[in-house]
Image (tube, rainbow, N blue to C red):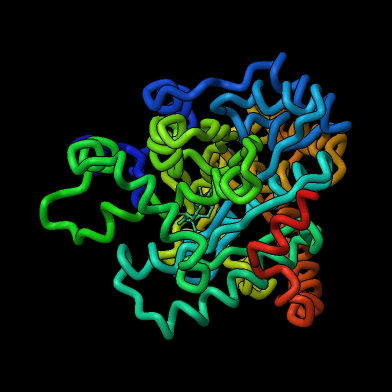
């Protein structure tokens, strides 16, 4: 079912009926480009390796990615910017853009700003500051447990870094009127005025480096397609302020366990959360994960399954390092040599293994947490 005024995707809501077949159309409607084989090969060649998120078509759309690659080739470089709105516990879906961002950071050895938009969740989710500061800390630890470069990673927390953000957000906001905000985000007259201002805050990290260094440095933003409306607005405004338009690379959503829409924090059984125990992961996968298999084992042996719509397979193909194994499993499942129960058992174990590794790393990260926090001086230094 579409959302208010027929929108299917906004940064705050995604239609439950959104399926694999809708992404190309939506990206085109948003005005984004599609990552074709040439662009993907060029990115992987410059990165010095392949990546399952690209090869499996999960990161599938972009804005001006080619300009980033030109800047890599001509030695100008670029930096990465991504973020998280700390509304509660993180699930596997939230982790995907960060996993991909980590690969980009490692491959290109570049700086990364991670914005934590606690102000957004104050305005859009009616959360209170006390709760937000706890969630913020927990989410940051979850993100850092993926292993970002401490020298080159800068975590900017909106409510704590106001002096960096505010003046620049005001500059952006002068170029965004209410009519545009309503058209892009679907806001109503009854929405609080903070919501109208918020996109200006989310746009700042995309020109912050250029602003602090006094010279333009290109910014690449990895995110799922829901965040595109923000950066579409930034792209209109930045040239008016003398900055480069930000580039972006966009993914599809990890769907809810039951298939369709996106994995979301509001329904605990719609997703796998990073603190789910192996028993819970197994139960959720066995009981709720949408299967591309047949109704009976006999039918599946005979006709095979459809891996493309299978939740468990779709997660597996992204978290398994051995991509040759992914191809073998895909073939076995597709031809009926592997049954849904076997696939689910294997994937539940793999997910729990990944979560256990993150948990272990998370404990080490508690010590180094402060090192990652943003300061203007540290950011400027890391570009010297
Ligand atoms: P948030 O916290 O809703 O989501 C964090 C990141 O995860 C992506 N995402 C998903 N990706 C795959 N499958 C899903 N089911 C799924 N659900 C969410 C989001 O697109 C996002 O990349 N306003 C932002 C925070 C933010 C930000 C940014 C995000 C600030 N600056 C720059 C990306 C880039 C937010 O609330 O994200």
Given residues 72 and 18, the one toward you in this image is 72
Whether residue 181 sits left or right of residue 363 in the image: it is left
Left or right? Give the position of 314 relative to 368: left
- Is there any visible trace of residue 9 in the rendered image? yes
Q: Quadrant of the N terminus?
A: top left
> Hey, which residue is sitting farthest top in the picture?
38
Horizontal side of residue 23 vs 336, given as left or right: left
Residue 285 position by quadrant = bottom right
Q: Residue at horizontal 34%, vertical 50%? A: 13
Residue 306: tell me if it is visible: no
Front residue of this view, candidates 293 and 26:
26
Give the residue at x 39% y 30%.
236
The residue lying furthest to the front in this view is 214
The image shows residue 9 at horizontal and vertical percentages of 36, 40
- Please say if 264 is above or below 32: below
Q: Is residue 122 above or below residue 350?
A: below
In percent of width and height, residue 158 lies at 48, 66
User: In the image, what residue occupies the spot 21% across and 59% down?
Assistant: 193
Residue 278, position as x, y percentages in the image: 69, 71
Q: Residue at x 39, y 27 (%)?
A: 30
Splitting the image into 4 quarters, where does residue 110 fall?
Answer: top right
Residue 72 coordinates in the image, percent (x, y) = 78, 28
């Amino acid at each position: 079912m579409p959302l208010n005024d027929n929108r299917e995707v906004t940064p705050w809501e995604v239609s439950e009926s959104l399926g694999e077949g809708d992404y190309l159309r939506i990206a085109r409607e948003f005005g984004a480009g599609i990552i074709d084989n040439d662009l993907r090969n060029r990115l992987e060649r410059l990165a010095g390796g392949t990546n399952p998120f690209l090869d499996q078509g999960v990161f599938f759309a972009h804005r001006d990615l080619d300009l980033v690659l030109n800047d890599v080739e001509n030695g100008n470089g670029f930096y990465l910017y991504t973020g998280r709105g700390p509304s509660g516990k993180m699930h596997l879906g939230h982790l995907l853009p960060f996993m991909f961002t980590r690969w980009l950071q490692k491959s290109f050895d570049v700086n990364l700003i991670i914005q934590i938009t606690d102000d957004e969740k104050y305005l859009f989710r009616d959360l209170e500051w006390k709760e937000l500061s706890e969630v913020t800390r927990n989410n940051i630890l979850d993100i850092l447990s993926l292993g970002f470069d401490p020298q080159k990673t800068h975590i900017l927390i909106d409510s704590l870094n106001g002096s960096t953000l505010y003046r620049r957000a005001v500059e952006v906001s002068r170029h965004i009127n209410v009519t545009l905000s309503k058209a892009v985000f679907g806001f109503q007259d009854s929405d609080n005025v903070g919501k109208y201002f918020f996109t200006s805050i989310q746009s700042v990290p995309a020109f912050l480096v250029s602003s602090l260094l006094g010279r333009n440095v290109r910014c690449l933003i990895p995110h799922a397609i829901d965040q595109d409306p923000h950066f579409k607005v930034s792209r209109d405004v930045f040239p008016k302020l003398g900055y480069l338009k930000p580039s972006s690379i966009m993914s599809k959503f990890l769907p809810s366990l039951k298939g369709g829409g996106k994995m979301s924090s509001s329904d605990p059984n719609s997703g796998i959360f990073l603190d789910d125990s192996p028993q819970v992961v197994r139960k959720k996968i066995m009981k709720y994960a949408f299967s591309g298999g047949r109704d009976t084992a006999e039918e599946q042996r005979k006709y095979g399954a459809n891996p493309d719509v299978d939740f468990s397979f779709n997660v597996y193909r992204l978290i398994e390092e051995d991509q040759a194994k992914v191809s073998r499993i895909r073939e076995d499942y597709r031809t009926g040599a592997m049954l849904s129960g076997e696939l689910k058992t294997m994937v539940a174990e793999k997910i729990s293994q990944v979560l256990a590794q993150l948990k272990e790393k998370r404990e080490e990260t508690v010590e180094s947490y402060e090192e990652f926090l943003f300061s203007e001086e540290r950011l400027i230094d890391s570009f010297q």
